[in-house]
Amino acid sequence: MEFIRSFSCEDFLAALESWTWLPIEGMSPFLCNAFGEIFLEAEDGIYFLAIIDGKLDKVCDTKEELQHILNTREGQEHYLWSVVIKANYDLGMRPKENEVFDFKVLPALGGELKPENISLCDFIVTSNITGQIHNQIKDLPPGTPISEINLEET
C-alpha cells in the first residue's frame, strides 16, 4: 500500500500548470500523496497543495519537520489520507505508475468522501482538471449552484 507517490520533476511541473493562480512560483514540488496532493518547498518552509479545497497552506519549516509529522498517525490521516487509501486498497484499487486516486465528483462540487466517488486517474490530468475547477469556483460563496465548468488543455 502506497501513501506516497513518486513522480519526476517534469511530471510535477506539468501537474502544477493549472495551479499558477496560487502563489506557487519559486516553490519546488518534491512529494505527493496518493491523491495527487503535492508538498512544495519554499524558502520559508514546506507547503501543502490540497485538492479537496484547492488551497495552499504552510505545513512546517523543514523537510525534517514534515517527516516527523508524517510519522504520526494524525499526520498520515490528514496529509496522506491513510484511512481512505487503505479502504480503497481493501476494495482492490491499485494505482498504476502514473496514477493517483481521484474524486469522480470533487467534494468542492458536492462529491462525497465515499469509495464509490473515488477512482484512479493520471496524475497530471487530474491535477490540471482539479486546478482549473478550483480556480473557477474559488471566489463563489458556499452553496452557489454551479451550472458549468470550462476545461482547457494545458
Image: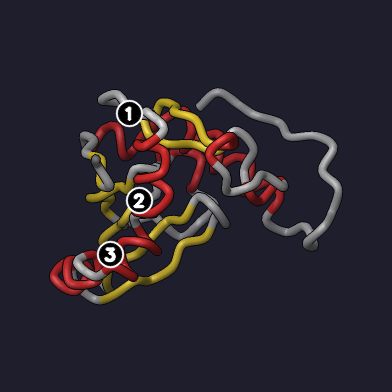
Q: Give the residue at x 58% y 48%.
A: 113
Q: What amino acid is at disc 3? A: Ala
Q: Nearer the viewer, mark 3 or mark 2?
A: 2
Vertical comparison of 151 with 30: above or below? above
Above/below status of 91 relative to 77 = above
Few, some or many C-alpha atoms within 10 Å of disc 1 (few <14, some 14-19, many ≥20)?
A: some
* Contact flag, marks 2 and 1 (Cβ < 8 Å): no
Residue at which label 2 appears = 38
Q: Earlier in the sequence, mark 2 or mark 1?
A: 2
**Measured Cα–Cα span from mark 1 to mark 3:** 32 Å
Q: Nearer the viewer, mark 1 or mark 3?
A: 1
Farthest front residue?
90
Along the viewing direction, whichever of 118 and 133 lies nearer the viewer = 118
Point out residue 85 in the picture as x, y percentages from the top left corner: 37, 45
Q: Residue 22, position in %: x, y?
A: 50, 56
Find the distance from the CA under tag 2 to the CA under tag 1.
Answer: 19 Å
Label 1 sits on residue: 94
Say which element carries label 2. strand
Looking at the picture, the colour scheme in use is secondary structure
| Frontmost residue, 114 versus 147 | 114
Amino acid type of the residue tagged 2 in the rendering: Ile
- Please state the horizontal and vertical placement of residue 109, each as a whole percent of the image: 70, 46
The residue pinned by badge 3 equals 42
Left or right, 80 with reference to 110: left
